[in-house]
Image: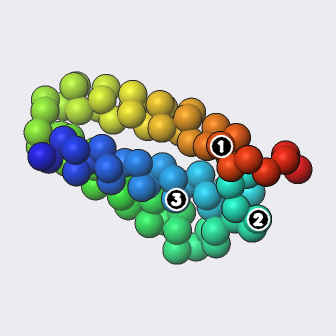
Amino acid sequence: MWYSALILTMLVASALLYLSSKQQALLNTPLPVAPYRYLSYALLLATLVGWNLLLSTTAAVFLWLLLLGSLLGWIPFLSLLRGSPLK
């Protein structure tokens, strides 16, 4: 249960990080940087602490980096599922 909660939190944090970027293609205008990007950083730090409580330090950092890289790599491709033409 804690694993799925941490993965979901990382998904939300990665989505907020991507949607607050200028280069995102999902929204017409990006989310404001001030609350959302900092919230994303706080959530990512909290998930790193959560993984560290569940796993050993090495495994926690490895899993955190693996999930972060995977999520940030796949979230931009969601704009292709929208069906609208590219800008």
Contact check, label 1 and label 3, Cβ < 8 Å: no
* Kind of element beneath mark 3: helix
Residue 81 horizontal side relative to residue 68, left or right: right
Tell me if 13 is positioned left or right of 76 in this view. Answer: left
- In the picture shown, does residue 11 fall above or below 61? below
Q: Which image quadrant is residue 42 in?
A: bottom left
Viewer-nearest residue: 28 or 37? 28
The amino acid marked with disc number 1 is: Leu
Q: Which residue bears the numbered disc 1?
A: 81
Identified at 55% across, 35% down, the residue is: 74
Q: Which of marks 3 and 2 is nearer the N terminus?
A: 3
Is 72 left, or right, of 41 in this rendering? right
Which is more foreground, mark 3 or mark 2?
2
Residue 3 percent across, percent down from the top left:
18, 41
Image quadrant assignment for residue 56: top left
For the residue marked with disc 2, what is the amino acid? Asn
The residue that label 3 is drawn on is: 16
- Badge 2 local density, few (<14 within 10 Å), some, or many (20+)? few
Task: State the CA–CA distance, disc 3 to disc 2.
Answer: 15 Å
Tag 1's secondary structure?
helix
Residue furthest front in the image: 83
Mark 3 nearby-residue class (10 Å; few <14, some 14–19, many ≥20): many
Q: Which residue is drawn at 30% across and 29% down?
A: 63
User: In front: 14, or 4?
Assistant: 4
